[in-house]
Image (cartoon, rainbow, N blue to C red):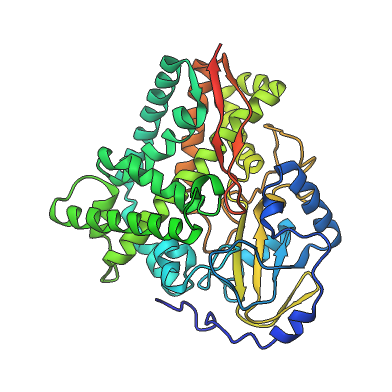
Amino acid sequence: MHPGTDAAIRPAHPAAERATARPFHDLEVTSRAFWSLPFDERERVFARLREEAPVSWQPMMDGAIMGSELPGMWVVTRHEHIAQVSQEPETYCSGQGVQFEDVPEDLLEASHSFLAMDNPRHRQLRRLVSAAFTRRQVERIGVQIRQQATAIVDGLLEAGGGDFVRLVSQRMPTWTVYEMMGLDPALREEAAHLADEMVGFNDPDVCGDREAGDVLNGALVGLLSMGLEFADLRRREPADDLMTNLVQAEVDGERLTDDEIAAFFVLMSVAGNDTTRNTISLAAHALQQHPDQRDWLLGDLEGRLPGAVEEFIRWASPVMTFRRTATRDTVLAGQPISAGDWVGVVYASGNRDERVFDEPHRFDLGRTHNPHQGFGGGGPHFCLGHFVARQQLRDVFRELLTRAPSLHLGEPTYLAGNFVRAVTALPCEIR
């Protein structure tokens, strides 16, 4: 384990007794019941918090796989404060966890890779991973995505209907990520299933009769084992793919360890799949609900599509929350934050902030000012794969809008949880 910055150590939390007496805000947003509500109902609560208490003291999440000694946590709902927390890593660190639930320390880096690291280790590992994205690799990724988008819509048209998530949304990022990595096609379905379990470990429909902790641990071990075996294979049998580049990448004489490569494989499997997949589902559904916006976009598809993609991401807000830990006493939006306090940011709320976005509850593909936080709030943890996600969205919607104009979608089914706004099923038909 790497502690990251000198400041980012796990403090004893000297303010715990005082914090215990602090009253929680009347508008509670950390229960499983709250995160099981529809998005619009949650947003009404966040809108009130943005106005009345942009940094509010909340109970710890219930239903977590392990308890916490902390009496509560801060929840940040305004765009400007989310950006401040994201861009001040010396004050708000990532190395002690990034989710609203606590994760066992020995699993933290294994499950989150450099998302759960601080400088200097975060900077070193990110530079090594970035070095694996060579110019040639980036060009290959672009060609693959265009080909995949065409093939996926071919399959949708041939099927004539079914589950849009399985036919389109899931296939696009899964295919891209594992094709880019070079993973054996025979292993891709298993890897994607394990990634789904890592995200949905708290959802009763995913767990069944298993304990949530067992689901998370089993999925993580499965992906780590796959990543380790894959890295070993590429050391023995190099190929023209990202995994080969990762095992060979070197910056200032340093290379990635097997454990770091396996953890990055987990990160790619989870983050590289779920965010794009759910944006595709949610944006396709929004286009059907707003036919005027669809018609406007088709009026100049190539010229308007890049800006429309940014609105797709803002509207979907596929990653809803992240968490940091205060490394020292500070003040945020007038609230005194103590060293060791958890500070959770709600991107889904920041992306609807009335102070930043004109008519934020309107799906507006022509929006000209759109500093959304769909890839994070800025700072060192800004999404490394944002360029891949944007191209996936451009290419798949170009194909859908021009080749499947009679596509009709039913109502989506959502995963219960506070981390990813996940659509588990979306019926469709070609009429």
Residue drawn at x 42%, y 61% as measured from the top left = 111
42 horizontally vs 381: left or right: right
Q: Nearer the viewer, residue 264 or 402?
A: 264
Residue sitting farthest toward the left = 236
Instruction: From the top left corner, tell me how far across and down residue 182 is, in percent.
Output: 27, 44
Residue 395 in view, yes or no: no
Q: Is residue 160 above or below residue 345?
A: above
Q: Residue at x 34, y 63 (%)?
A: 128
Furthest toward the front, the residue is: 209
Q: Where on the picture, by quarter, is residue 252?
A: bottom left
Residue ranking furthest to the top:
431
Q: Image height check: is 300 above or below 196? A: above
Q: How many marks?
A: 0
Q: Is residue 286 above or below residue 335?
A: above
Q: Quadrant of residue 85?
A: bottom right
Q: Position of residue 3 (x, y in %)?
A: 45, 79
Query: Going by the image, does 94 lie left or right of 125?
Result: right
382 vs 60: above or below: above
Name, please, the residue furthest toward the right. 52
Where residue 114 appears, as percent x and y from the top left, is 44, 64
Of residues 34 and 151, the one drawn nearer to the viewer in this rendering: 34
Q: Quadrant of residue 173?
A: top left
Location of the N terminus (image quadrant): bottom left
Q: Residue at x 36, y 61 (%)?
A: 263
* Residue 226 seen in this snapshot: yes
Residue 431, given in percent of the width and then of the height, sits at 56, 11
Residue drawn at (71%, 34%) of the image:
363
